[in-house]
Amino acid sequence: MVNKVNESIWIGRTDDTEDCASFRYHQVVELANIKQISGGCAIIGFECEEGVRRNKGRLGAAGAPNALRSGLANLPWRFPENAQLCDVGNIACDGEDLESAQRQLGEAVTAILSKGAAPIILGGGHETLYGHYLGVRESIGKDATLGIVNIDAHFDLRPYDEQTSSGTMFRQILEQDPQSRYFVAGIQRYGNTQELFDRADLLDVTYVHEDEMIPGHLDNLMVALDNFIGHHDAVLLTLCTDVLNAAFAPGVSAPSPFGLDPSTVRAIIRKVAGHEKTRSFDICEVNPALDENGRTVKLGAHLVNEAIASFILKA
């Protein structure tokens, strides 16, 4: 079930009540149910950290959806007057029943896509991605090829024989869905075991190491993304914020001392979300409970804005 959010979350500075050139997010966003959507972008939150708990990570990401909304609320809305942004609410994980929550998220994502809108999913732990995937796969059909682009320090290809978690999703997908392929940018050489690198090679994962992604020198990465996207019928984009340098994003489950510069992540979001084949976006692992002065939430909100801008401006 999708629970409506309290409209008080969407508050911010008001420079003018009539001149739309002065509007901010909180003056534009419409709280609506999925049946009322007609294009544009639709925000949906996934209040879940059960996958993080199972993966023995630091808890707190379940509070991120509403925190990110608050971060977005005050940002200037610099888009065409006819651009649409809806907020359909949150899906919450009931206790430890991660799998049911992921199925619910998948159903909501499918419904949003059926309305011609781009789902903007606010996680939650990175287990959010599996529900996101379920929805896109249902929308495009079982025979279409799906490219999954992940901006992440970790492969998330752990075994799931005993239970799934925030570290298993991509292995689940690749072993169960022969029509899906996986590209991950930002991999830490010493943030993943050799077994995970071997598993990535076995599953034909395309990956780019963090130290190969230098700001201002991303031409090879952009070419690789173009090639990957070009081989698929549809694409989804997922961002795990632990890929960011911990100096910019301390409020995550697993901080990265040698993580990516925010400008690099922004460039990838613009590239992928702005492509005509890309259907949807999620942001995961923002942890307000561990944040310092709201830095990670603020950066996360700005990166969500980049995704929204990319979807709206390509329409």
Image (cartoon, rainbow, N blue to C red):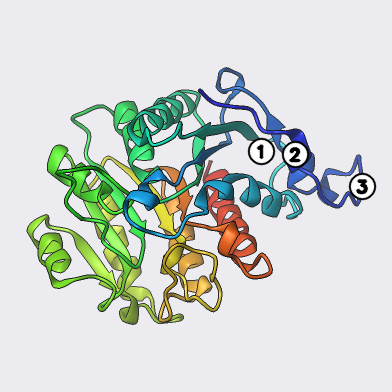
* Residue lying at 33% horizontally and 51% vertically, measured from the top left: 166
Observer-nearest residue: 188 or 178?
188
Q: Earlier in the sequence, mark 1 or mark 2?
A: 2
Observer-nearest residue: 87 or 311?
87
Whether 143 is drawn above or below 76: the answer is above
Mark 1 = which residue?
A: 83
Q: Position of residue 61 (x, y in %)?
A: 51, 52
Type of amino acid at the residue the image marks with label 3: Asp
**Any mark on residue 16, and which?**
3
Q: Position of residue 150 (x, y in %)?
A: 34, 57
Whole-angstrom CA distance, mark 2 to mark 3, is 12 Å
* Residue lying at 59% horizontally and 58% vertically, measured from the top left: 288
Q: Position of residue 306 (x, y in %)?
A: 57, 56
Whole-angstrom CA distance, mark 1 to mark 2, is 9 Å
Type of amino acid at the residue the image marks with label 2: Val
Q: In the image, is 89 to the left or to the right of 129? A: right
Whether 55 is drawn above or below 144: the answer is below
Whether 264 is drawn above or below 301: the answer is below
Q: Position of residue 135 (x, y in %)?
A: 36, 31
Mark 2 = which residue?
A: 28
Q: Dot 2: what SS?
A: helix
Q: In the image, is 62 to the left or to the right of 205? A: right
* Residue lying at 75% horizontally and 39% vertically, measured from the top left: 28
The answer to whether the residue labelled 1 contacts the one labelled 2, judged by CB atoms less than 8 Å apart, is yes
